[in-house]
Amino acid sequence: MEHPSIKKRPIIGNIRTLCPLNCANSDDAVVLNKLPSNNHKCAQHFNYGITRIGEETFFWRSGNCLNQIISFDVRCGFPFRERDFVDTNRDQFFSLI
């Protein structure tokens, strides 16, 4: 008997590999870049991207992108209060970098 949470059997077109990003307490994550950028077998939103499952954030790949030798730059965003970035004496933004 099939488990009630399984809605369909995996086929090659919907199998994804998930890699945890370890972005604890992040509220945003985005793929900034892929290298080499001219690799057309990896197309964002079609066969790679970022997804959240519960509180965890994952990078995923699928299809033709799975077997490509490629690297991705990923940024995790964290919820900071505005006052953490504003100098109250001069009311100017400053960089954390």
Image (cartoon, rainbow, N blue to C red):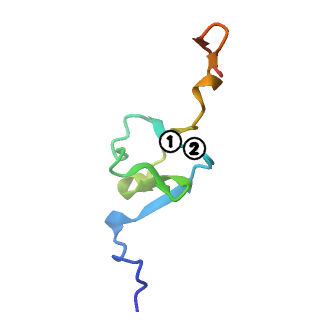
Of the numbered discs in the image, which one, if any, rests on residue 58?
A: none
Side of 12 where 87 appears, left or right: right
Could you give the CA–CA distance between mark 1 and mark 2, rounded to whole angstroms? Answer: 7 Å
Vertical comparison of 65 with 72: above or below: below
Disc 1: which residue: 29
Q: Label 1 neighbourhood size at 10 Å, few (<14), some (14-19), many (20+)?
A: many
Q: Quarter of the image containing the C terminus? A: top right
Q: Nearer the viewer, residue 36 or 97?
A: 97
On the rendered image, what quadrant is the N terminus found in? bottom left
Q: Is residue 88 left or right of residue 33?
A: right
Q: Residue at x 40, y 65 (%)?
A: 15
The answer to whether the residues at label 1 and label 2 have Cβ atoms under 8 Å apart is yes
Pick the residue in front: 7 or 59. Answer: 7
Q: Residue furthest top?
A: 90
The amino acid at mark 1 is Ala
Q: Is residue 29 left or right of residue 38?
A: right
- Name the residue: 38% across, 40% down: 39
Q: Indicate which label's residue lies in the foreground, 1 or 2.
A: 2
Q: Position of residue 89 (x, y in %)?
A: 67, 9
Where does the image place residue 60, in percent across and percent down from the top left? Answer: 46, 54
* Secondary structure beneath label 1: strand
Q: Which mark is residue 26?
A: 2
Q: Nearer the viewer, residue 85 or 41?
A: 85
Q: Secondary structure at mark 2?
A: loop
